[in-house]
């Protein structure tokens, strides 16, 4: 039985005349016909940027890592910054689809599909950086433990960098499986309304021949629940392991136990900001304001203000603990981080991440499309600076003052970063045009409890008695049967 | 719902426009002793399994064992490599340093459980790219809910009974659908 929901709670599916087939129409329409002009312009821009990114990748491989701005002191900079930034962004997708599923948050259904797609594309972008930083990319498979002819020579299982290999590849695989298993029923929906034989064939292949029998749905629900249960600790482990890349080293500024929770909160924070950016664009281009409502935006902004505050507390804790340690070198690392040559980056980080999201305590701003978009961009910028600050400020003044240095990026560094944004948006725009951008089946499953039309019926006292008897159906078979016969006669 | 030994080809399809009507109809039809072949819906209908008489799936149990396989694989492979095949001192730690192996073990547990479960799910649900399914009514992935009844071996009286009971439950449409073995169902 669809669970009863208070009529006071804001509807998650807006519109006076919504019904199941209108949901299908509204969502599937975006994959049919010619794309809107806004989509074409965005796609042209994104793919041009992506091509430049691919060029920079080729240039890096052709010339060598020397074309990046790295030096002997700062031997990790934009590459690892971008890697952590992208991985962090990816986390929101899993959080929305898995954690919110476990917490039975119904607003998840409007945004989970796009957020999961975002996860997958973000992880692809993230993966490029460590792989290309290896220099000889064609030997990237050396990172996997496999029997080889180089004597018994294996990878180092004590190294967090190897844990990262396992974490990221598992994360990518599981996210992809989770996403795709949810897509199959929706592809079947597109197939069954396709006009041409070719379209029917393509979407049938994509749907794996789904029909939606009771047993299929039963297994589907079981699979979703277990995958959500597995993804929840997985997503926490992934960013924990990413933070271990730094935290298990002996570099002051990196070697801190606060890193795992701090990184995970930051990841959720930046990920939700990116989901916000994408959803605001998507709902506008594809006219999906009835499914991605202000209530959805507000919920995401609440997560942003919460995680933003956690991140703020982490920044302050770092400083306090450095002072409290009484250890000169640790203190200097943080003094230098906040007030050294990279002061501008630290200030940008603090402003964008800690101060700016605090405006979301005001309901009016939380529900404003303009401010949501603006602040989501701020947070994205701020979280990039966070990683840059952690990585570069800790490295640039290392143990020997004679090798102290200042990092300046080259055009290739910038090109790679901007290029991955291009790759990301190219993939996302392709997804939005060819795949159901909102989980059709899941939105329909909350229709009876959370749609505006269903709610207006609930508040009607005459219908309320009817809803009430439904909610007792499963518990009191005999009692309910009486009602059924009555209802059948009415029909 | 039972899996027939011989493939059924002729069906009665009753269509409903709301999940509550579908659930009521299933109860009513089953109380009349009529066997339902299957129920189709555009989204998972909560509470349908007990009413339809479906047993709980064992997919999650399978998932547990796949996960266990992952844990054992990770620990045994790492142990073999670090302790026996390639013992090397790293940071003065023992050859076999369990805490350091937990992240990889955890990841492989999750990986094996997920991949194993999804594979089982696809096999059990008979889903694969290019599979041509039998579509009873195209609208069951859009806005309608269907109950199907296999009628190959049913007499005319039985068929009429099914139809009249379906009528009592407020079915929107009652159709007959026949598949040929050589049928191209994606029409």
Image: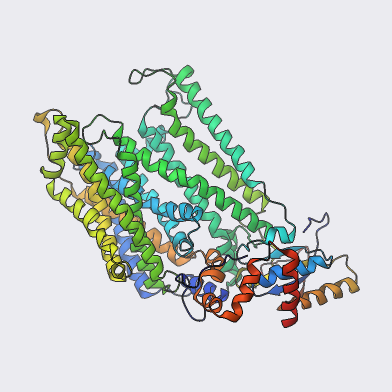
Q: Residue at x 39, y 49 (%)?
A: A123
Decide: is B130 above or below A5.
Answer: above
Among the 4 quarters of the image, the one containing residue B7: bottom right
Place of residue A304 in the rendered image (x, y in percent of width and height, measured from the top left): 33, 57
On the picture, is A310 further left or further right than B36?
left
Q: Is residue A362 above or below residue A160?
A: below
Q: Position of residue A2 (x, y in %)?
A: 59, 66
Q: Which corner quadrant holds the N terminus of chain B?
A: bottom right
Instruction: Let me know if residue A71 appears in the view.
Output: no
> Which residue is nearer to you in this view: A379 or B118?
A379
Which residue is at 11% across, 44% downward? Answer: A339
Relative to A177, A114 lies left or right: left
| Colour logic | rainbow
* Residue A325 placement: quadrant: top left
Is A391 left, or right, of B57 in this rendering? Answer: left
Q: Vertical placement of A253 versus B142: above or below? A: above
- In the rendered image, which quarter contains the C terminus of chain B? bottom right
Q: Is residue A232 above or below residue A293?
A: above
Nearer to the camera, B97 or A461: A461
Q: Residue at x 27, y 35 (%)?
A: A256
Residue A14 can be seen in this image: yes
User: Residue B79: image x %, image y %?
Assistant: 49, 22
Please state the horizontal and vertical placement of residue B130, each as a whole percent of the image: 62, 57
Badge count: 0
């Amino acid at each position: 039985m669809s669970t009863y929901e208070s009529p006071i709670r804001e509807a998650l599916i807006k519109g006076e005349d919504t019904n199941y087939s209108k949901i299908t129409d509204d969502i599937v329409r975006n994959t049919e016909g010619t794309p809107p002009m806004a989509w074409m312009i965005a796609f042209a821009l994104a793919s041009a940027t992506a091509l430049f990114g691919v060029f920079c990748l080729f240039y890096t491989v052709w010339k060598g890592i020397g074309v990046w701005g790295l030096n002997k002191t700062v031997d990790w900079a934009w590459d690892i910054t971008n890697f952590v930034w992208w991985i962090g962004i990816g986390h929101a997708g899993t959080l929305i689809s898995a954690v919110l599923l476990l917490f039975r948050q119904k607003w998840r259904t409007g945004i989970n599909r796009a957020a999961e797609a975002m996860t997958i594309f973000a992880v692809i972008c993230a993966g490029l950086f460590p792989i290309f930083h290896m220099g000889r990319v064609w030997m990237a498979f050396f990172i996997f433990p496999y029997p080889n002819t180089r004597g018994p020579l294996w990878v180092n299982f004590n190294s967090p960098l190897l844990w990262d290999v396992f974490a990221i590849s598992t994360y990518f695989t599981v996210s992809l499986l989770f996403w795709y298993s949810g897509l199959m029923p929706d592809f079947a929906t597109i197939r069954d309304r396709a006009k041409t034989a070719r379209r029917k064939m393509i979407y049938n292949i994509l749907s794996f021949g789904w029909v939606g029998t009771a047993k299929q749905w039963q297994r589907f629900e079981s699979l979703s629940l277990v995958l959500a249960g597995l993804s929840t600790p997985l997503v926490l482990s992934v960013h924990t392991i990413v933070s271990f890349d730094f935290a298990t080293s002996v570099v002051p500024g990196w070697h801190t136990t606060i890193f795992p929770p701090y990184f995970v909160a930051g990841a959720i924070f930046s990920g939700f900001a990116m989901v916000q950016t994408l959803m605001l664009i998507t709902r506008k281009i594809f006219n999906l304001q009835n499914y991605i409502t202000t209530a959805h935006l507000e919920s995401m902004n609440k997560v942003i203000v919460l995680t933003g505050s956690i991140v703020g507390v982490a920044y302050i804790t770092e400083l306090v603990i450095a002072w409290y340690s009484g250890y000169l070198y640790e203190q200097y690392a943080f003094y230098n981080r906040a007030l050294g040559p990279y002061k501008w980056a630290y200030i940008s980080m603090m402003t964008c991440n800690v101060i700016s999201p605090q405006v979301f305590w005001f309901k009016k701003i939380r529900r404003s499309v303009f401010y949501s978009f603006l602040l989501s961009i701020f947070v994205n910028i701020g979280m990039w600076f966070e990683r840059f600050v952690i990585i570069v400020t800790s490295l640039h003044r290392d143990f020997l003052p004679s090798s102290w240095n200042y990092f300046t990026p080259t055009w290739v560094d910038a090109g790679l970063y901007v290029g991955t944004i291009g790759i990301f948006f190219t993939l996302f725009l392709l997804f939005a045009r060819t795949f159901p951008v909102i989980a059709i089946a899941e939105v329909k499953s909350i229709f009876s409890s959370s749609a505006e039309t269903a709610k207006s019926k609930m508040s009607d006292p005459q219908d309320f008695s009817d809803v009430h008897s439904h909610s007792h159906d499963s518990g009191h078979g005999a009692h309910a049967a009486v009602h059924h016969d009555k209802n059948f006669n009415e029909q | 719902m039972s899996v027939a030994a011989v493939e059924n080809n002729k069906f009665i399809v009753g269509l409903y426009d709301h999940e509550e009507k579908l659930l009521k109809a299933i109860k009513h039809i089953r109380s009349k002793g009529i066997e339902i072949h299957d129920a189709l819906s555009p989204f998972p209908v909560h509470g349908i399994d007990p009413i339809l008489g479906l047993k709980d799936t064992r997919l999650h149990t399978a998932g547990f064992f796949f996960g266990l396989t992952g844990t054992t694989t990770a620990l045994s492979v790492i142990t073999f490599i670090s302790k026996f095949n390639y013992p090397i001192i790293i940071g003065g730690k023992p050859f076999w340093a369990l805490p350091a192996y937990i992240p990889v073990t955890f990841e492989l547990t999750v990986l094996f459980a997920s991949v194993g479960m999804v594979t089982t799910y696809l096999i059990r649900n008979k889903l694969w790219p290019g599979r041509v399914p039998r579509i009873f009514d195209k609208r069951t992935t859009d806005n309608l809910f269907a109950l199907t009844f296999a009628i190959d071996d049913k007499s005319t009286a039985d068929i009429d009974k099914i139809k009249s009971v379906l009528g009592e439950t407020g079915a929107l449409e009652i159709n007959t659908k026949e598949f040929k073995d050589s049928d191209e169902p994606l029409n």
